[in-house]
Image (spheres, helix red, strand yellow):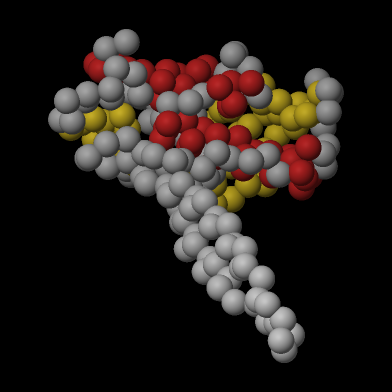
Amino acid sequence: MTSHNSRSSLDGIRFGVLAFVVGGSLLLAGCSGEAPADPGTSLSTAAGSTSPSATPTPTPTPSAVYKPADASGPAQNVPVPVLPEVAKTETKEGLEAFAKYWFELLSYGYETGDTEAVSAITSANCAMCERSKQVQTGWHEDGRWLAGGQVTTPVVNTSFKKASDGQYQVAVQVSQEAMSYYNADGSLDSTDPKPADAGSLMLAVFRDGAWYVNTIEPIAG
């Protein structure tokens, strides 16, 4: 996939699912490393007794620090979204939590090019989802990378009414950051400005004990 073809997949969809007024949610918080704890150096001893050798306290391994992508290179140590326990339940709260998680995975894909997790819970019939994944994977091949583009979901809401076909609807307000496209040689290929927040409608079903996205469509305003 060439740089040109990869980017053309994004044009007209503004991040595929994102553009149609729907975006994703994932506030990528940086993971900061913890400072090593001071090892113990003395022990209280009874009078006249010999002080035993002190056992050093193990030094904790610092957490990998999240570094967002920029002109110098791709993102590093991007936190992997975690499915909340409530998102495993067929409840209003569970569906809303799942929708947020889904968009966190979408945002994760823009930073890493990894779309495996979101693909596992999304129908291949979701056209906008597939196009956005093409952009994500295409711009993380052959040394290319994306900077920015993080997605958040300020508002997620569902009436939690199950349709006759088993689907539930979730309305999502999506916000996405501006995005820059970098070639393998480090040159800036192009940029997309921050788009206006948009709304999208997620259609999901609960099957085999888990939520699954059938499609995401723009909400006409």
Residue 195 placed where, x, y %?
36, 42
Rendered view: 3 above or below 201: above
Residue 4 point in image, percent of width and height:
24, 16
Q: Is residue 121 left or right of residue 137?
A: right
Q: Position of residue 73 (x, y in %)?
A: 27, 36
Count numbered badges in the picture.
0
- Farthest bottom residue in view: 47
Q: Give the position of the N terminus as an image quadrant.
A: top left
Q: In the image, residue 78 lies at what x, y percent?
A: 46, 41
Q: In this orientation, does residue 37 appear? A: yes
Q: Residue 15 is drawn in which quadrant?
A: top left
55 shown above or below 141: below
Q: Residue at x 15, y 30 (%)?
A: 187
Residue at image coords 77%, 45%:
86
Of 5 and 169, which appears nearest the observer?
Answer: 5
Residue at the location (49% across, 53% down)?
A: 62
User: Along the line of sight, which residue is nearer the eye, 76 or 128?
Assistant: 76
| Residue 103 appears in the picture as rendered | no
Q: Nearer the viewer, residue 214 or 102?
A: 102
Identify which residue, 47 or 102, lies in the foreground. Answer: 47
Left or right placement of residue 200 versus residue 143 in this view: right
Q: Residue at x 62, y 63 (%)?
A: 55
